[in-house]
Image: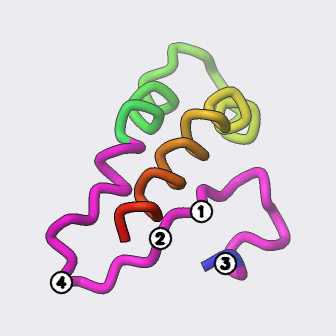
Amino acid sequence: MPQNFKLQKENGIFIKTFYGDDVNDTALIDLLPILIDIGSSNKENVDVRYELKKYSNYIIKKITTNFDKC
């Protein structure tokens, strides 16, 4: 829900809502490469906002693709 990160837009990743019975939902799996890359960074004090901005085109493409499947 966008309201959850409306005050810190750079810290959120908008994905479609998961209802618990959608076996075709792959939103988190699609984002896994980004999350692993950010989490395994050798840098100290990684700025998640900067890292998410680097991947914004990838995230938008994945989100758009997932919504088109709905």
User: What's the CA distance linking mark 4 and mark 3?
Assistant: 22 Å
Is residue 60 inside the magenta stretch?
A: no
Rounded to the nearest whole Å, what is the CA distance between mark 2 and mark 3? 13 Å
Instruction: Please state the total of marks drawn on the protein image.
Output: 4
Looking at marks 2 and 4 on the same chain, the residue that comes earlier in the sequence is marked by 2
Q: Which residue is mark 2?
A: 16
**SS of the residue at dot 4?**
loop
Question: Which of these two is toward me, 4 or 21?
Answer: 21
Res 19 quadrant in image: bottom left
21 up-or-down from 40: above or below:
below
Query: Alpha-carbon distance for marks 2 and 4?
Result: 13 Å
Secondary structure of residue under mark 2: loop
Mark 1: which amino acid?
A: Phe
Separation of marks 3 and 1 at Cα, in angstroms? 10 Å
Residue that label 3 marks: 4
Q: Which residues are magenta?
A: 3-31
Provide residue 5's location: percent of width, then percent of height: 72, 70
